[in-house]
Image (cartoon, rainbow, N blue to C red):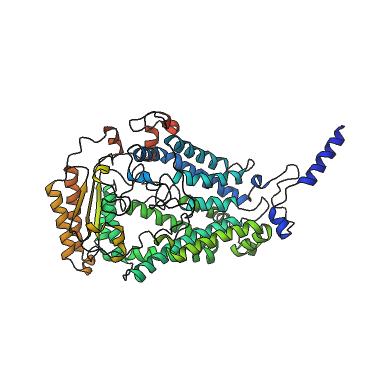
């Protein structure tokens, strides 16, 4: 066959087999936004997203990958402890502290230690490959979406990866995988902003509805005061200046009230600010949200930076346009972008819209608060929605440990797995396997009827319950009892009394000092002394573990074993 004939044959093949989107056939659309060029066959998985979406994919995936690599040694440390010591948490796999199924339907499979590490590094690789738009970005985004559940589903109660800190990640990956073609509009970025706004709004609505509608209390300054004090028990900051700031905050009722109300205003107002504020509103919303999460990290030790905050890169195009002084055209409004996106990609647009509607339904029905109905990663974000007042009649408790629960690698016991809980309680024998001293205390004289199901009935009505993996001194137990009685003798309005709050904080500090004086258990693994508060940053932990490939080396808790 001659050279001219071969070219004609190739041209005929291109004409006959050029990729047609399924939605083109369904909606009779002729917009070829999924064809990069006439030279290459372009199936769906090879279709490049629009330029702005490609930029966000790169920044988002690289940021998340960095967080995964940085915290991988901690994840391995946790998984080694849970699986090799057969802790109660090893019984389940799933998402959130209840280890629910994927979207409430699909169970998360159990992985061996080797499989867990392979899935983790495969997830990192898939995220990085999704950044290369000429390879198969959608394929790797979908692959990362699935690998998320395999990896994070093994870490449902780990102190860095567990809980709700990473539930936004799979939804963003899915919406990106459904984005338009290279010549299309960046409508998928609008869906991501809307999804994030709905999540924040759901958190605010949950606080208001649960506190006023179910518990009959207002979600105000006393609640903020109680949750910050909880963090001073279980997650004390290593910087004394932060500890001083927490004390100053808790002794000033108006500061607690200001932070509580401003948090509600932030969650209620974030989505409207994005929708009606234009570019400046979007940039301001991103800056406020980032400040909010940094403040939560500082005051409460809940780190949303690695797997939640990278989503704020979605506002970078707005910042670039504002920086270069470009005026917003009518066609660049979010409503116009969504309308244009439906014209270009009606099928994938409808898939994204359906996913957003599902998130709204989960939020409206408060499924996270219904036993057995949780369907993460869709969530109504009921974190800290229970109203609190330490000086009123309520269940009280805390955790004192020399493990740094602000860091990764530990079972997050701040609010879960108490020995008296009805779900996955940690017995005294289980506590002996924890690499560090842990003390649980609880007073169950007053338990709201909605919360009694969380505790074993035989532990209700007790003035003081104490359980630890070391010998608790009589003086420490007596100080805890004094603290409980101080609360019992107080009046509900005493949360605004600076002097009485200061007395409580003094008792808490005394309990911490007495805890530090207690001898460590002789059975404690010496190799885990490095897992204490004297730890460095996750980066230092990664270097100490031998760099990125340090997981290949055996350790005391992870020898070479057959998995």
Q: Quadrant of residue 337?
A: bottom right
The answer to whether residue 6 is visible is yes
Query: What is the total number of numbered labels drawn onto the structure image?
Result: 0
Residue most toward the front?
A: 458
201 sits left or right of 15 in the view:
left
Q: Quadrant of the C terminus?
A: top left
285 sits left or right of 249 in the view:
right
User: Residue at image x 47%, y 62%?
Assistant: 362
User: Residue at image x 58%, y 58%?
Assistant: 352
Instruction: Tell me: residue 121, above or below residue 188.
Output: above
Q: Nearer the viewer, residue 290 or 217?
A: 217
Instruction: Tell me: residue 341, above or below residue 3.
Output: below
Q: Quadrant of the N terminus?
A: top right
Residue 237 place in picture, x, y as percent: 29, 48
The answer to whether residue 499 is visible is no
Q: Quadrant of residue 226?
A: bottom left
Q: Quadrant of residue 13?
A: top right
Q: Nearer the viewer, residue 554 or 533?
A: 554
Residue 74 place in picture, x, y as percent: 38, 40
86 sits left or right of 499 in the view:
right
Residue 529 place in picture, x, y as percent: 27, 36
User: Residue at image x 35%, y 44%?
Assistant: 407
Q: Nearer the viewer, residue 328 or 370?
A: 370
Residue 133 place in picture, x, y as percent: 62, 43
């Amino acid at each position: 066959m001659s050279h001219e004939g071969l070219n004609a044959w190739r041209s005929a093949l291109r004409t006959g087999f050029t990729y047609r989107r399924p939605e083109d056939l369904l909606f009779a659309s002729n917009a070829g936004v999924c064809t990069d060029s006439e030279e290459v066959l372009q199936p769906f998985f090879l279709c490049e997203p629009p330029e702005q979406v490609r930029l966000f994919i790169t920044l988002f995936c690289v940021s998340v990958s960095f967080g995964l690599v940085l915290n991988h040694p901690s994840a391995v440390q946790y998984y080694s402890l849970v699986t090799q010591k057969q802790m109660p948490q090893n019984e389940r796999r799933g998402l959130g502290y209840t280890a629910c199924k994927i979207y409430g339907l699909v169970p998360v499979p159990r992985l061996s230690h080797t499989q867990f590490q392979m899935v983790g590094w495969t997830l990192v690789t898939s995220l990085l490959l999704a950044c290369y738009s000429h390879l198969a970005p959608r394929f790797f985004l979908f692959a990362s979406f699935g690998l998320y559940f395999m990896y994070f589903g093994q870490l449902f109660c780990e102190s860095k990866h567990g809980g709700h800190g990473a539930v936004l990640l799979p939804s963003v990956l899915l919406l990106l995988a459904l984005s338009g073609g290279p010549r299309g509009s960046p409508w998928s970025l609008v869906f991501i902003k809307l999804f994030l706004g709905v999540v924040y709004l759901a958190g605010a609505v949950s606080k208001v509805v649960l506190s006023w509608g179910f518990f009959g209390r207002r979600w105000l300054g006393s609640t903020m005061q109680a949750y910050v004090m909880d963090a001073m028990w279980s997650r004390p900051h290593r910087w004394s200046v932060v500890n001083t700031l927490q004390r100053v905050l808790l002794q000033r009722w108006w500061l607690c009230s200001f932070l509580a109300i401003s948090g509600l205003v932030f969650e209620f107002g974030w989505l409207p600010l994005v929708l009606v504020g234009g570019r400046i509103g979007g940039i301001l919303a991103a800056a406020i949200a980032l400040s909010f999460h940094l403040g939560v990290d500082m005051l409460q030790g809940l780190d949303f930076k690695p797997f939640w905050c990278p989503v704020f890169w979605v506002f970078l195009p707005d910042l670039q346009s504002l920086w270069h002084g470009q005026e917003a055209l009518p066609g660049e409004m979010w409503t116009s972008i969504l309308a244009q996106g439906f014209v270009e990609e009606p099928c994938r647009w409808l898939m994204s819209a359906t996913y957003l509607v599902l998130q709204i339904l989960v939020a409206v029905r408060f499924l996270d608060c219904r036993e057995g109905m949780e369907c993460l990663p869709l969530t109504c974000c009921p974190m800290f929605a229970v109203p609190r007042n330490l000086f009123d009649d309520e269940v009280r408790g805390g955790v004192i440990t020399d493990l740094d629960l602000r860091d990764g690698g530990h079972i997050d016991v701040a609010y879960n797995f108490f020995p008296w809980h009805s779900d996955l309680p940690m017995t005294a024998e289980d506590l002996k396997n924890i690499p560090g001293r842990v003390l649980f205390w609880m007073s169950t004289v007053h338990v709201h009827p909605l919360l009694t199901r969380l505790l074993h009935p035989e532990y209700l009505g007790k003035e003081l319950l104490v359980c630890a993996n070391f010998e608790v001194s009589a003086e420490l137990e007596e100080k805890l009892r004094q603290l409980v009685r101080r609360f019992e003798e107080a009046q509900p309005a005493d949360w605004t009394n600076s002097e009485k709050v200061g007395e409580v904080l003094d008792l808490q500090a005394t309990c911490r000092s007495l805890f530090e004086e207690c001898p460590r258990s002789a059975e404690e693994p010496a190799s885990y002394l490095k897992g204490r508060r004297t730890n460095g940053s996750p980066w230092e932990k990664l270097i100490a573990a031998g760099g990125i490939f340090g997981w290949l080396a055996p350790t005391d808790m992870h020898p070479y074993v057959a998995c």
